Image: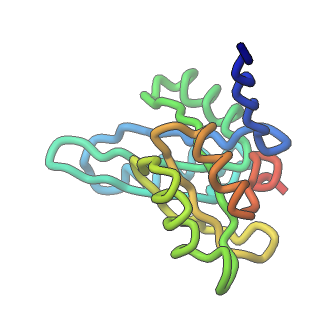
């Protein structure tokens, strides 16, 4: 009786996975500016930003050129945050654009928890940050569909 082949391992993008820092802010005037100034004081740039606001708290999702340096400063200053690994996909005009990306993920039957575009344009092209139900599986789906995936080093240039 033949043994089934073991599943092939997913080849992750070369480099360090992109890490998002989520900061929990009081819902008050100037809170976002204060966090951005703290980040800039570390000589780090914000390359991705999403703000989710509610009555009590604001969650700011940040993709940074150096998340480790900023995480250290946040810990030192007692700023509450969490880290999440993201999949960042480069989008081209026409083929391999947003529609094709979403179609590939749909056909792969993987869910997107949230997404947002990057503020910068790595390689001169649009990029989309995705928090997927299963990042490794989503990476394999996007790779098989011909998409370019970006690492932390691609965003830190």
Q: Which residue, as the protein is rendered here, is positioned at the far front?
A: 1
Residue shown at 65% from the left, 56% from the top: 142
Q: Quadrant of the N terminus?
A: top right
Residue 9 appears left or right of 73: right
Task: Name the spot of residue 10 as percent of width and height, x first.
Answer: 73, 36
> Residue 30's image quarter?
bottom left
> Which residue is nearer to you in this view: 31 or 112?
112
Among all residues in the image, which is located at the extreme left? 55
In the image, 27 versus 6, the foreground residue is 6
Q: Is residue 41 left or right of residue 81?
A: right
Question: Residue at horizontal 85%, vertical 43%?
Answer: 14
Q: Quadrant of the C terminus?
A: bottom right
Residue drawn at (65%, 47%) of the image:
139
**How many discs mark residues in the rendered view?**
0
- Which x, y percent locates residue 129? 56, 56
Going 53% across and 35% down the picture, which residue do you hit? 84
Residue 125 place in picture, x, y as percent: 73, 75
Q: Residue furthest bottom?
A: 94
């Amino acid at each position: 009786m033949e043994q089934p082949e073991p599943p092939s391992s997913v080849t992750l993008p070369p480099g360090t996975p992109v890490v998002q820092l989520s900061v929990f802010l009081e819902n008050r005037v100037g809170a976002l500016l204060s966090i951005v100034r703290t980040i800039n004081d570390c000589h780090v740039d914000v390359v991705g930003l999403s703000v989710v606001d509610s009555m009590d708290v604001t969650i700011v999702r940040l993709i940074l050129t150096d998340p480790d340096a900023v995480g250290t400063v946040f810990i030192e200053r007692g700023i509450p945050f969490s880290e999440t690994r993201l999949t960042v996909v480069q989008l081209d005009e026409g083929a391999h654009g947003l529609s094709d990306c979403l179609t590939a993920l749909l056909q792969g039957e993987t869910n997107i928890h949230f997404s947002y575009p990057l503020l910068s344009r790595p390689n001169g092209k649009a990029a989309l940050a995705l928090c997927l139900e299963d990042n490794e599986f989503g990476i394999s789906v996007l790779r098989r569909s011909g998409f370019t995936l970006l690492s932390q080093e691609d965003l830190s240039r």
